[in-house]
Image (cartoon, helix red, strand yellow):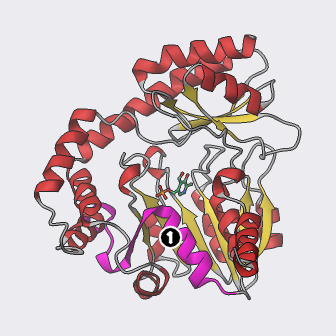
Amino acid sequence: MNYYLERKIFHLRSLGSYSDQNSEIPSKDEKGLLKLDSNENLQLPKSFIKKILGDAAESTDPRVYADGQREELIQLLGHHFNVDPDTLVIASGGDELIQGITSSLMTSNDTGVTIEPTYSMYRYLLKSFGRKRRMIRLSEDFSLDMESVRENLAGTDEVVFICSPNNPTGNQFPRDSIRELLESTKGFVVLDEAYADYAPESLVAMVNDYDNLLVLRTFSKAFGIAGMRIGFAITNSALAESIQKFAILPYPVSSYSMAVGSLILKNLDVVRRTISQVSETREKFVQELMQVRDVVVYPSVTNFVLIEIPELSSTFAYKMKQQGIKIRIVDWIANERNFVRITIPPIDQLKRVVRVFKEVLAQ
Ligand SMILES: Cc1ncc(COP(=O)(O)O)c(C=O)c1O
C-alpha cells in the first residue's frame, strides 16, 4: 500500500467510529438477542409489518429512482404535522440530516453547541468534520441549566443541537426553556425530537414562530421502521429547500422505504396502540427496577430509561448479553458513575428482563 493510503487509513481511524463512542460490546452474532439497546419499536406487530412490506412492494418499481413515493410521503407528513409540505426535508435517517447540517450547512467558522449528556452523534459528526465545538452541561438532575444556556449562547455563527426528549436521559425540556434558548442565540437551533411521539408534546409548530429552528424527526423510533432509514426535518421553507438540495444526496431514501413510510402514516392507529403499550410497560418496568437496592431510575417520557447501577456498566451489560439481552452502556455520562440505557421491553418480555436484571446485579 502506498504512503498516501496509509496516511488516509490512519486519518480515518483517528476519527473513531460512532460505535466506539458508545462503548459497544463487539460481537459477531447478534441473532436471538433481545435488542434493548437502540430504542426501536419492537411492539409493532410482525403481522402488520409483513402486510405493509407486501403492499409497498406491490406499489414500487425498483427499476426507476422514484415514482411518486416522495410526493406521497411529503403530503402525508404535511397533513400529519399540519405543516406545509415545502417545510419538509427527507433524508436517510435523522442521522443523515445531522450529517448534512454538520458537513454542509456548517462551515469552519461555525461552532456546534451540544447540551450534554446527549445523543453522541452530534459530537461524533462535529468532530469528524473538524467543526469547533462548545459544550453546555445539563444540571445534576438532567434539567436544562438556563443560566448556563444564557451564558454560553449569543453568538451568531453557532448551531445548537438540543435533543428533547433527550437521549439518553429520557426527559423532555419545558417549552418555555426551548423558546428562551431560541431567543438566546443569533445562530441556528436543531431540535431533535426523535422520541417526541412518546412524549406529552411536540414543538413542531414552533417552526412557524422561529425561522432559526429546525425540528428533526425519524421513522426509526415510535413509527417502528428503523431499518427503512427515513428521517425528516421541519423548518422554514427556504431553508428546507436548500438543505434538501445542497446538504442531502439526490435520492437519499429508497422508493420502497418511502412507500412503507406512507403506509405507516396511513395506519397510525396501530402505531398509537404501541405507544400506549410502551407507557404502560414503562411504568411497570420503572416500579420494578426502583425497588432494586442502589439502583436509580431516571424519569422518562420515552421508550427507554436511564438507570444508574452499583456496578461497572460494561461488566453489567456484558453479563446481560450473556443472558440474551442487549442493553446500551452509557458510562460516558459522568466520571466514575455507572449508567446503562434500556429500551422498554415488549410486555411479554417484561418479567424476563426484570428477573435477569435483578439476577445479574446480585451475582
Ligand atoms: C436522539 C436521536 N436522534 C436521531 C437518531 C437517528 O435516528 P435515525 O438515523 O435512525 O433516523 C437517533 C437514533 O438513535 C436518536 O436517538
Q: Is residue 239 magenta?
A: no
Q: Is residue 74 visible?
A: yes
Question: Where on the picture, by quarter, is residue 176?
Answer: bottom right
Residue 211 position in % (x across, y down): 51, 82
Q: Is residue 88 magenta?
A: yes
Circle 1 packing at 10 Å, graded few (<14), some (14-19), many (20+), is: many
Q: Amino acid at mark 1?
A: Leu
* Residue farthest to the front, as pictured: 1
- Of residue 36 and residue 71, the one placed in the foreground of this image is 36
The dominant secondary structure in magenta is helix
Question: Where on the picture, by quarter, is residue 160?
Answer: bottom right
Q: Secondary structure at mark 1?
A: helix
Residue 239 position in % (x across, y down): 47, 85
Which residue in the structure is indicated by mark 1? Answer: 97
- Of residue 49 and residue 87, the one placed in the foreground of this image is 49
Stretch of the chain drawn in magenta: 78-107
